[in-house]
Each structure stands twice: as C-alpha cells, then as structure tokens.
C-alpha cells in the first residue's frame, strides 16, 4: 500500500535517515502476535516485506481485522502517546521482515530535537487519523445493520 502515511511519504529524507539510525532488523513468522490490546507499547515497526493485520478484540467473537499493513507502513502508534498502551492487536499474516524501534529511544530523540519530534508527531498523527477512519468503516461493515454505506 502506498499512502501519505508511509514513512517515505510522510517524513523528509533527513528525518527518515535519523529515525533509521535507531532501527534494528527483525523478522516474524506468519501467525506471530506482535502485540496485544492493553499491553505496554514499548516498540514499533515499519514493515519491509509481508503483511501485518491490525485487529480488535470483540467479546464472544473472533478478533475483527481492522486493517492490513504492508511495505513502508507503521505498525503501532500507541508508543507515542501516554499511557503507552496498545489500543489494538497485531499479527503477522505472512512472513514479515521489519525495522523495529525502541519507543523510549525514539521519544528521547524527539525530545532533544524539536523539529525531528514535530515531524514524527505529524506522521504518527496522520497514521492515527487514517486508522480511525479505517476502523470505523471496517466495524460498520462487520457489525452495522447496513454496512458502511455511503456518506451522505
């Protein structure tokens, strides 16, 4: 998926470079849970290859898949906002290679460089807004009496 919320589209080159200096490469097998709702958000990822599904716990039902993320997409935004608790869950739907970031290190870097911090905050804010829209549409499709329908 290519959108305004991918790292390459959202961050200027100098800030991408700086952020990537804090990354480490990781891989996940299909079916691996990256995080669960309600747990501490102490890291985040940018997908290199593969697909990660974001899901929402629904009592008495299987988790509802809200969105699928691929190349260049940010997995996890809860690390950026206190109390740093995951609001959704995430699972690797295929083998995934990603860059992993320690949230505390990124927040500390943001605190020492206001312009970098502003760029990261704008990016994460764009991701949150996009995910809220996607969640609304997906939940209406799954549980609304007439699906998401059109906006009138």
Image (cartoon, grey):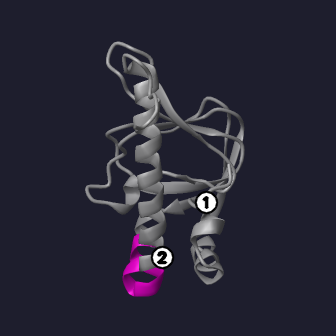
Q: Position of residue 26 (x, y in %)?
A: 66, 52
Q: Judge the density around disc 1: few (<14), some (14-19), many (≥20) Cα neighbours within 10 Å.
A: many
Furthest residue to the front? 152
Task: Looking at the picture, tell me which residue is in the foreground, 11 or 50.
Answer: 11
Vertical comparison of 94 with 82: above or below: above
Q: Position of residue 16 (x, y in %)?
A: 62, 75
Q: Is residue 113 visible?
A: no
Furthest residue to the top? 60
Furthest residue to the left? 83
Q: Quadrant of the C terminus?
A: top left
In contact (CB < 8 Å): disc 1 and disc 2: no
Task: Looking at the picture, tell me which residue is in the foreground, 2 or 46.
Answer: 2
Q: Judge the density around disc 2: few (<14), some (14-19), many (≥20) Cα neighbours within 10 Å.
A: some
Residue linked to disc 1: 6
Residue linked to disc 2: 119
Vertical comparison of 79 with 34: above or below: below
Secondary element at tag 2: helix
Q: Is residue 34 visible?
A: yes
Q: Position of residue 39 (x, y in %)?
A: 34, 42
Vertical comparison of 48 with 151: above or below: below
Q: Residue at x 37, y 16 (%)?
A: 145
Instruction: Count how many numbered circles sit on residues in the image.
Output: 2
Looking at marks 1 and 2 on the same chain, the residue that comes earlier in the sequence is marked by 1
Q: Quadrant of residue 64?
A: top left
Secondary element at tag 1: loop
Q: Is 131 placed left or right of 17 in the picture?
A: left
Q: Residue at x 65, y 79 (%)?
A: 13
Q: How far apart are labels 1 and 2 at the CA level?
A: 13 Å
For the stretch drawn in magenta, the main secondary structure is: helix
Magenta stretch contains residue 124: no
Q: Which residues are magenta?
A: 106-117
């Amino acid at each position: 998926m290519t959108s305004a919320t991918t790292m390459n589209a959202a961050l200027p080159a100098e800030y991408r470079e700086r952020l990537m200096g804090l990354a480490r490469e990781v891989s996940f097998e299909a079916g691996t849970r990256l995080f669960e709702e309600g747990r501490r958000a102490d890291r985040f990822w940018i997908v290199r290859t593969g697909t990660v599904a974001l899901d929402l716990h629904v009592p008495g039902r299987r988790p509802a898949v809200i969105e699928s993320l691929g190349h260049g997409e940010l997995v996890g935004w809860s690390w950026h906002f206190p109390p740093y608790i995951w609001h959704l869950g995430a699972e690797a739907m295929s083998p995934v290679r990603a860059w992993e970031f320690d949230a505390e290190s990124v927040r500390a870097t943001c605190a020492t460089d206001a312009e970098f911090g502003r760029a990261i905050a704008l990016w994460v804010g764009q991701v949150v807004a996009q995910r809220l829209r996607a969640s609304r549409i997906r939940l209406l499709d799954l549980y609304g009496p007439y699906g998401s329908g059109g906006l009138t």
